[in-house]
Image (cartoon, rainbow, N blue to C red):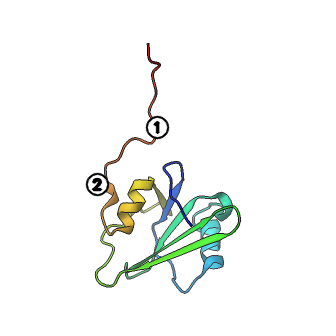
């Protein structure tokens, strides 16, 4: 089972992917288009051209997980845009918001790291 933790790196591909691709095709996209190793343990998120579905690819040390969410109605309204970058990063709580068809840019969560001061 996939468990997304705050320590995980999450990369969202900006350009739509061909959803006829399976694990091998998406892993190739990770290497060629996103310039990342699909075996790194990072979470990779892709959407289709019509923005009605999202695929999430992650390697857990033993094999790949490929999750596919297709909306029964509507579209994923928010998706990152950038003219020069192939992908953008999200925090774990932002991925949860994205998969719930929300706007991760407006999601507020606790900082992923904060200093701890010693107690006197």
Closer to us: 101 or 79:
101
Give the structural element (helix, strand or loop) at label 1. Answer: loop
Q: Is residue 85 left or right of residue 28?
A: left
Q: Are marks 2 and 1 in contact (CB under 8 Å)?
A: no
Q: Residue 113, which numbered label?
A: 1
Please identify, in this view, whether the residue under mark 2 or under mark 1 is nearer the observer: 1
Closer to us: 119 or 76:
119
Q: Quadrant of the N terminus?
A: bottom right
Distance (Cα) linking label 2 and label 1: 19 Å
For disc 2, the marked residue is 106
Q: Sequence-wise, which precedes: disc 2 or disc 1?
A: 2
Other residues around mark 1 within 10 Å, as few (<14) / some (14–19) / many (≥20): few
Q: Is residue 18 left or right of residue 35?
A: left
Q: Residue at x 62, y 58 (%)?
A: 41
Residue 85 visible here: no
Corner quadrant of residue 31: bottom right
Give the structural element (helix, strand or loop) at label 2. Answer: helix
Q: Is residue 54 left or right of residue 77?
A: right
The image shows residue 111, relative to residue 17, as above or below, that is above
Q: Quadrant of the C terminus?
A: top left
Residue 13: horizontal and vertical position, in percent? 49, 66
Q: Residue at x 62, y 61 (%)?
A: 35
Q: Residue at x 54, y 87 (%)?
A: 20
Residue 26 visible here: yes
Residue 59: horizontal and vertical position, in percent? 64, 65
Other residues around mark 2 within 10 Å, as few (<14) / some (14–19) / many (≥20): few
Corner quadrant of residue 100: bottom left
Residue 69: horizontal and vertical position, in percent? 43, 77
The image shows residue 112, relative to residue 96, as above or below, that is above
């Amino acid at each position: 089972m996939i468990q997304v933790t705050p320590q995980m790196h999450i990369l969202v591909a900006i350009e739509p992917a061909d959803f006829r691709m399976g694990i091998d095709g998406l892993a190739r996209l990770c290497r060629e288009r996103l310039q990342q190793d699909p075996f790194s343990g990072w979470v990779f998120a892709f959407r289709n051209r019509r923005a009605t579905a999202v695929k999430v690819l992650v390697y857990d040390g033993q094999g790949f997980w490929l999750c596919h969410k297709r909306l029964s109605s509507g579209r994923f309204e928010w998706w990152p845009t950038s003219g020069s970058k192939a992908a953008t990063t999200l925090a774990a709580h932002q991925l949860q918001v994205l998969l719930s068809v929300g706007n991760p840019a407006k999601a507020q969560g606790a900082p992923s790291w904060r200093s701890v001061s010693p107690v006197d």
